[in-house]
Amino acid sequence: MNNKEEKIKYFIYARKSSESEDRQVQSIQDQVDELQKLAKNSDLTVVNIFSESWSAKAPDRPVFNEMLERIKNGEANGILCWKLNRLARNPIDGGTISWMLQEGLIQYIQTYGRGYSPNDNVIMMSVEFGMANQFIRDLRVDTKRGLMAKAKRGWLPCGSPLGYIHNLFKTKGNKEIIKDEKTFDLVRRIFDVMLEGKMTPPQILEMANKKWGLKGKMGKPIARSSIYRILSNPFYYGEFEYPRGSGDWHMGEHEPMITREEFDKVQFLLRNDKNSTKPKNYDFAFRGPLYCGECGALITAEHKQKKQKNGVVRNYIYYHCTKRKNPKCSQKSIEEKKLQVLIEKELNKIDIPDVLQEWAIDILKKDNNVQAISRNHILENLGKEYKEVVDGISGLIKMRADKEIDSDEFKEEKLKLVKEKARIQKDLLDVDKGVNDWLKKAEEYFAFAENVKERFRIGGLSIKKDILNSLGSNLYLKDQKITVDLEKTLKVIEKMATESRRINEMFEPQKGVENKRALRDLYSQSPTMLPN
């Protein structure tokens, strides 16, 4: 604990939301109880307690904002909370806390595992706030990973096509796709009529709707566009692409409706149908994370062929707004090569050389070693508490054996001690895990930024997609320019990258051992690298 000569006044802040992000977090009252105990044991002055049931994924929490305003008014200059992620899981609130700490409005932040002062390395706090924000993003990633795993097992994760349904008797995530007895044979009949080659898809559609009584998933007649989707969907012969547009194909475990040969013949017939649209086989590197900066709709891509006067056919890929939110959106399309140049310019902002990456990790590890002293002190205290609880359980058993207490008293007291034992065990794990997690995340961030521009430039499709998805949230394309809301930690790295380029210009080329040593010394002297 860090107790300044000038007594710090603390606000206790406890938060828990009902969303999935906080399912494993202690209740608000439990947090308050533990923090009050921590304040008493550490002789900390608490002047008020703030608590709220509110998600920290977005800014504008009323109680949190009130607490910060009262700190600005001088009522307190310290915060006592369970973990940093109780204060913020979004970059705006995290940045506000970091700034108030650096400006001295907040003199100290004490959590159950460690403390933070204005003189601490700002990189570490940025990493921890970045981790809290990343946790929310990871929930989405974990869901995506689960869907990908299901696809690899041969089951389409999203909605099943007409003619099939999910087996409702299976658990969520394991629902197999089976035949829909109401529609399977009718959809098969669509393929049969198409294979005869005597009717066009619109004619088959009219027959299916009016004579067969075939209905779509919502119980309505099938639309014209749906008949083409059915006839060109590989799922019916046993394969599916997931995610759509990724180029990743999976062999399904569902029962095929037609054979591959029948499907190929249908595609031949569709190509000769002037009303059909040939399925696209192109994959697009930058479709998905980009949004239109004017209307906020997704950016999509399309392939175009242009035939020159000399007969040569050239292929182009253009990206443009889907205009689903605003059909009158004025944004124009941009060619993929030009878009890649724009992305490379953004990546250049956080691109760091290997010597900076090595230096930064060394600094964080040294800081971790310093914090280990405080961490070991906490572990020692928790160990003593754990031993007292275990001794209490043993004594309780002896009292029951000697009939000093009855069965009800024994059960009640034992339940309290067992709960306390479980709580201490969790805290023991959290103290170590928390430090290891942020250090691991820091290494991942700096490894990501190391020569990222070059890796993006020469990398394949999957590498480009991964880098773009990891760059940050809110990637916008507007007026042939890209804006990116970088992750909190990447913003710190961006400042470091700019400073490193200024320093590195004095040491070109950067190959010799002496130059590397000189660079590391200059990094350590730079206030931008290590703000105080």
Image (spheres, helix red, strand yellow):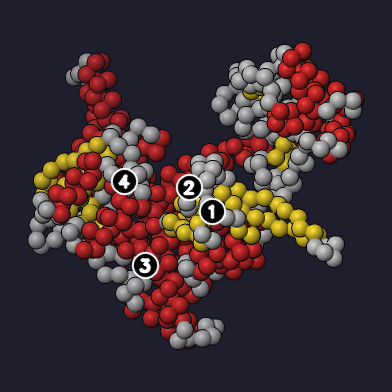
* Residue 292 percent across, percent down from the top left: 51, 51
Between the residue at mark 3 and the residue at mark 4, the CA separation in whole angstroms equals: 33 Å
Judged from the image, the secondary structure of the residue bearing numbered disc 3 is helix
Quickly name the residue at label 4: 59
Q: Which mark is residue 331?
A: 1
* Residue 62 percent across, percent down from the top left: 23, 41
Labelled pair 1, 2 in contact (Cβ < 8 Å): yes
Judged from the image, the secondary structure of the residue bearing numbered disc 2 is loop
Determine the image quadrant of residue 199: top right
Give amino acid for label 3: Lys
First in residue order: circle 4 vs circle 2: 4
Binning the other alpha carbons within 10 Å of mark 2 as few (below 14), some (14 to 19) or many (20 upward) gives some
First in residue order: circle 2 vs circle 3: 2
Between the residue at mark 2 and the residue at mark 3, the CA separation in whole angstroms equals: 47 Å
Quarter the N terminus occupies: bottom left
First in residue order: circle 3 vs circle 4: 4
Quickly name the residue at label 2: 295
Tell me if I can see residue 340 in this picture. Answer: yes
Quickly name the residue at label 3: 366
Binning the other alpha carbons within 10 Å of mark 3 as few (below 14), some (14 to 19) or many (20 upward) gives few
